[in-house]
Image (cartoon, rainbow, N blue to C red):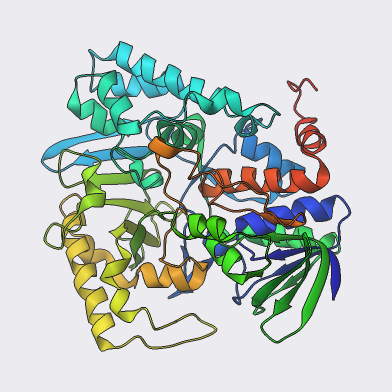
Amino acid sequence: MSYDVAIIGSGLGGLVCGALLSRNGYRVAVFEKNKQIGGCLQTYVRNKVIFDSGVHYIGALGEGRNLEKIFRYLGIMDKLKLQRLDLDGFDRIAFNGDPTEYRIAQGYDNFIAQLLKEFPGERKALQDYCHAMQDVCRRFPLYNLRIGSFAEKQEVMNIDASSFLKQLTSNERLQNVLAGNNMLYAGVRDKTPFYVHALVVNSYIEDSWKCVDGGSQIGKWLARAILENGGKIYRDTMVQQIVGEGNKVDHITLVNGQQVKANYFISNLHPSQTMAMTESDLIRGAYRTRINTLENAIAPFVLNIVLKPNTFPYLNYNYYYHQTEDAWEGIDYTADTWPLTYSLFAAASSRHMPYTDSLSILTYMRYDEVARWQHTFNTTSQEQHRGDDYEAFKREKSERLLDVVEQKFPGLRNSIATCYAATPLSFRDYLGTADGSLYGVQKDYKDALKTMITQRTKLTNLYLTGQNLNLHGILGVTISAVMTCGEILGLDWLLEQINKNDPSYIP
């Protein structure tokens, strides 16, 4: 087999790369180890109900926004079934013992107006917060789909998110409300940079959407674009080795021993997995060590609930709850205090509005809690029972999480038909991350450059893409894919093609 571009992994980054390159005449092949493509875009069905693996809501899809422009360029924007979340509170933030649900609204003016209802004396703090958010976002060129320099963003990369919010206002409740949806980026006090908070949360404040009937539609339409442009997608096909020769990759070897040649190779896997597969003297030991010792963000525990018909109203917003008054504390749980935080997402279904078919409830779980079963591997294509003790572990954790959720949603158990729990092992096996991390490499403001990984490698035709490069999430991964493809197509040219249908664009 021989192609212009061979892409390892069909997560969002791999699919966007495949769609971008095939649209521009490259013969593309995508190799996916699982039956289902899409990585975090994957959905699965239980009791005829669709569950998302990781796409619970999306920002930046409004007209003229960065993600909308990329999806429109790829020809998939008008095919997506979307529902805009509550303009006056797409996220609701709640704390134990406090009856108020604090609303995070869409549009910066509305954002300020809604929070002033609960914090009438904090206008200046809210205005300063919005100004800082927008200023940081303007400094990241690719976030704005333009060419720029590293110097633009350098001076804001070493700001700590938790410290910034603390100096913004003396009102501790407002500090924690502004940090209240930090599960979006697995926020860690004294570590997570403010730029991560800004880039992620800004994309939702400007506009927030849910995928009706699941986020896998994004992967489906991207895959169809690849196929319609003459590309190939190989499922159930694991890449075993990346073989270098001189300063280039010569070929990749599939698990069945078959060799695949290409002019360019793109890996959507975690960089540590990519390096483990790569045979080349050009990849120095120091680089491998640096990549292998990068800390990944914490993994999730997710409870996916099938609801009895017409028993639980659809919530056109997302719910973030904290067991303590400190929004940063949830990630530092102990065995006795777990879970200290959760986020709850109601599925947008086309079938039974104004009710929802299902809920997904996400909290944190460290990989070491499931390490005793790490020798097991279980997917639909390679099923393996992890043991009765593992099932008992999941049941116990599920009940503890439900106990906490029922504090704000009393009687939820009466609406449940069945529950399915996913642990860090589930995410490890389906998404291919070594420890089940949902958000890739953990960013650290104290050494921002160390946790930013370039798309280039020492091998001149091997590139990286995906959530571990710059930013996770649908938007972050898509922009990283643009950056990766810019190495092949020319970034200036590619950005001009994406932008040129925007009336406000000045080349």
Q: Quadrant of the C terminus?
A: top right
Nearest the camera: 289 or 19? 289
Q: Quadrant of the N terminus?
A: bottom right
Image x and y of residue 192, in percent? 37, 39
Q: Residue at x 77, y 50 (%)?
A: 20
Q: How many marks?
A: 0
Image x and y of residue 83, in percent? 52, 45
One can see residue 53 in this view: yes
127 left or right of 39 in image: left
Image x and y of residue 368, in percent? 28, 68
Query: In the picture, residue 178 is in which quadrant?
Result: top left
248 left or right of 135 in image: right
Query: In the picture, residue 115 is in which quadrant?
Result: top left
Nearest the camera: 488 or 365? 488
Nearest the camera: 32 or 152? 152
One can see residue 360 in this view: no
Relative to 222, residue 305 above or below: below
Relative to 352, residue 85 above or below: above
51 left or right of 460 in image: left
Image x and y of residue 104, in percent? 36, 32
Q: Residue at x 47, y 87 (%)?
A: 383
242 left or right of 165 in image: right
